[in-house]
Amino acid sequence: TMFARCYETAGITNKDRIQITPGYGLWTAGIGFQAGAEKLGAMVIPMGPGNTDKQLQMMQDMESTVICATSSYALLLAEEIQKRGISKEKIKLKKGVIGSERWSDKMRERIATELGIELYDIYGLTEIYGPGIGINCEYNSGMHYWDDFIYIEIIDPVTGENLPDGETGEIVITTLVKEGAPLIRYRTHDLSRIIPEKCKCGRCFPKIDVIMGRTDDMMKIKGVNVFPSQIEEILGTFEEISSEYQIRISHLDGKDTMRIYVETTGDYDFAVLAKRIAEKVKSRIGFTPIVKVVEIGVLPRSMKKTARVIDERYD
C-alpha cells in the first residue's frame, strides 16, 4: 500500500511499465518495488541488479516507462545510453524512482537531463516495511511520509532529546501497523528534519527533508569532524566538474591525509582546478586536502551504492 502510494504520488499509473533494478533476495529492496507496482496494477519488469547490456535491451524491447534504481546505477545507465549512441526515440522512460543512497542536486540534474525524465526520491529502511515509506511530490520540496503507518520524531543524535520541527537531527521511527516485529522509537542514524510548512501540492501527509547524511558518516581527520555532505556541497559549486567524486583517507608519515578525486566535464587545467577546489575546502573545514582531477569515466561506477568515502587508515 505504501509503495503504491509512492508510485501514485509520482504520477505513475497502471498503464506504466516499471523496470526494477534493485536487488532481490533476503531483504526488501527489489520485492518492495515490485509489490507496490503489483498493488498499483502496473506491468513489472523485475530485472534486479547488474547486466547492463540486458537492462538496456529490455528497456528498449519492453518500452519501460519507469526506472527504479539507486542514483549511482541510474547515472551509469544514462552514461551507457550516451556512450552506445542509443537514440532517445528508443528509450521510452518518463520517470525515475530513485532511492537507497544520498545524492547531490548536481547528480539529480545530470540524470534527469541525460535520460530526459522526472526523478522522484524515495525513503525506506529494510527494518521498517522496506522502501517506499516516503517520496517527494511534483514540487520536490521534501518527502511526504505516510503518517498512518509510521510516526517520525527528530532527535539530537548526541543527547537523544527531541528537536522541534525544522531542526536537523536523527530520524527516529515508530511503526504503527507493523506485525511480527514492530519497532518503537527506532534510531535510523539518518539525518533530516521535519518540514513544518504545508506543501503546495495540497497533500495532507507531513514531510521530511531529503536525507542529509548519517550520524555514522562522520570522519575525524586531523582532529576535525568532517561529513561527506560538507565536501559534496562544496564540490557542487564547481560547474567544471561532474557529480562523481571519491574521498580517500590515509595515514602517511604519521599524519592523516584526505585525498579528493573529482572528474572534469571539460577541457580545463587540472592543476589550477585542483588548487581552487583545495582552497575552497580548506576555507570550510580548516585544513588542505590533496585534490586529484581526473577525466570523466575514470572514477568507478556502481550498480548498487557507490562508495564515496574509503578510509584506508585501518587497512
Image (cartoon, rainbow, N blue to C red):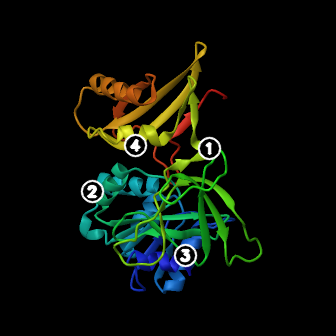
Residue occupying the point 45% across, 46% down: 301
Q: Which residue is label 4 attached to?
A: 244
Q: Quadrant of the N terminus?
A: bottom right
Q: Nearer the viewer, mark 1 or mark 3?
A: 1
Quarter where residue 52 is shown:
bottom left
Looking at the picture, which amino acid does disc 2 mark?
Answer: Gly
Instruction: Name the mark on residue 216.
Output: 1
156 w.r.t. 43: above or below? above
Q: Which residue is label 2 attached to?
A: 85
Q: Earlier in the sequence, mark 2 or mark 4?
A: 2
Q: Which residue is label 3 attached to?
A: 34
Instruction: Name the mark on residue 55.
Output: none
Looking at the picture, tell me which residue is in the foreground, 148 or 259.
148
| Residue at mark 2 to residue at mark 3: CA–CA distance | 30 Å
Q: Earlier in the sequence, mark 2 or mark 3?
A: 3
Task: Please rate how many residues cluster around mark 1, counting C-alpha atoms within 10 Å: few if below 14, some from 14 to 19, many from 20.
Answer: few
Looking at the picture, which amino acid does disc 4 mark?
Answer: Glu
Q: Earlier in the sequence, mark 4 or mark 3?
A: 3
Looking at the rendered structure, the secondary structure element under dot 2 is: loop
Q: Earlier in the sequence, mark 1 or mark 3?
A: 3
Residue occupying the point 55% across, 76% down: 34
26 w.r.t. 179: above or below? above
Looking at the picture, tell me which residue is in the foreground, 284 or 253.
284
Q: Earlier in the sequence, mark 1 or mark 4?
A: 1
